[in-house]
Amino acid sequence: MSATRAPLGLYIHWPYCRRICPYCDFNVYRARAYDTDLTDALIADLSGWAELAGARPLTSIHFGGGTPSLMSAPDVERVIDAAHRVFGLKSGAEIGLEANPAEADALPDLARAGINRMSVGVQSLRDDALKRLGRDHDAAKAAEAVRVAQKVVPRVSVDLIHTREGQSLADWEMELTEAIALGTGHVSAYQLTLEPGTAFARQAETGRLELPDGDAAADFQELTDQTLAAAGFTAYEISNHARTRQDRSVHNSLYWTGGDWIGIGPGAHSRLGCALDGGRLAAEARAKPGAYVSAVRETGRGSEAEVRLTAPEEFAERVLMGLRISEGIDRAALEDATGLALNSARIASLAQDRWINVTPRHVALTPQGRLLADRIGGELAEPG
């Protein structure tokens, strides 16, 4: 798959939050004053990527963070306009934004700025859980934000966190049912994990936080899949469920299927090309907002590190990401991009143990395999 043929997406990282959630390990900073300089740098950085990415229209734009719903609508529109000017947009391109319920009042203006898909960070519909998660909204505000989003954009996702401290399966099933009743076409349900360096990780080390164990986490995952399937959702990715193919996230699918994307903004990652084109470009922008802005001003680009992945490195990335989706790894596309093939002996062993399903074209996780995706991915990430 050459760089000129691969679909291209754009990720914009807005790193500011009103408060830092205790489970979050993203590149985020507490918002103090609005950073106009950062918006200017995003636009300049985008232009700097044009020569490397080639002339091809964007299939998707995604504003993530951080809390990109804190961006002003005029600045969101400026970035979208710049992307259109530099690359162009495919007809019907997905332009998504991660929205915090506390900014529900801003969502209509963001939609008018060009956003057509919103992922609303509900996280929970229980006030006590939201407080423990460090969120700045309650359950009523979360539901209101979902309703507002549904009025102003055609596609809305509800984002939830499960396997929380003290959470029961019965309450999670009820909470999922309430989320389904909000009527969106997409639900993202993520397991709460302890990430190094976070407040929750430190609390766990001192015994102030105890999450359900691995067996319980598997039970939560199975219940999530069953409850959403019964409501008409397909688990097209381990944590993502959609009512129809049109409800699926176009941008995230780029990551899972080995597409190309440009990442602008502090700490954003990029991937371009493939190993057979001389090495897939892997870039990471400077993490601190001030350093990122200075780098763009001085060099026209915000990247701190740019390397070419080897074929085995790209192979491992594609395997780990491809296993997450229901269709699984496209074996022909994987070999076409990297020149490497899956290990046939490992495939046979995992299939015999019913962790994977194998067809001439694809290797995909079985329902029980989805519960051990990271382990299985690790076994397959080394080529045959």
Image (spheres, rainbow, N blue to C red):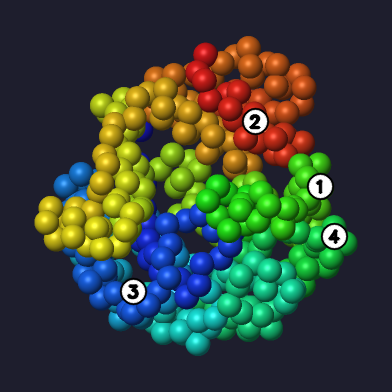
Which label sits in the foreground, 3 or 2? 2
Residue 95 visible in the shown view: no
Q: Which residue is mark 4?
A: 168
What is the quadrant of residue 69 in the picture? bottom left
Q: Left of 25 or right of it: where is 95?
A: left
Task: Name the residue type under label 1.
Answer: Ala
- In this figure, which residue is indicated by the disc labeled 1? 216
Which residue shows up at 26% across the image and 26% down it?
278
Furthest residue toward front: 206
Where is mark 3, residue-wise? 76
Image position of 373 with respect to 105: above or below: above
Q: Earlier in the sequence, mark 3 or mark 4?
A: 3
Q: Residue at x 66, y 49 (%)?
A: 205
Q: Which residue is mark 2?
A: 375
Identify the mark nearer the N-term, 1 or 4: 4
Binning the other alpha carbons within 10 Å of mark 4 as few (below 14), some (14 to 19) or many (20 upward) gives some
- The location of residue 60, given as percent across then percent down, is 39, 58
Mark 4: secondary structure? loop
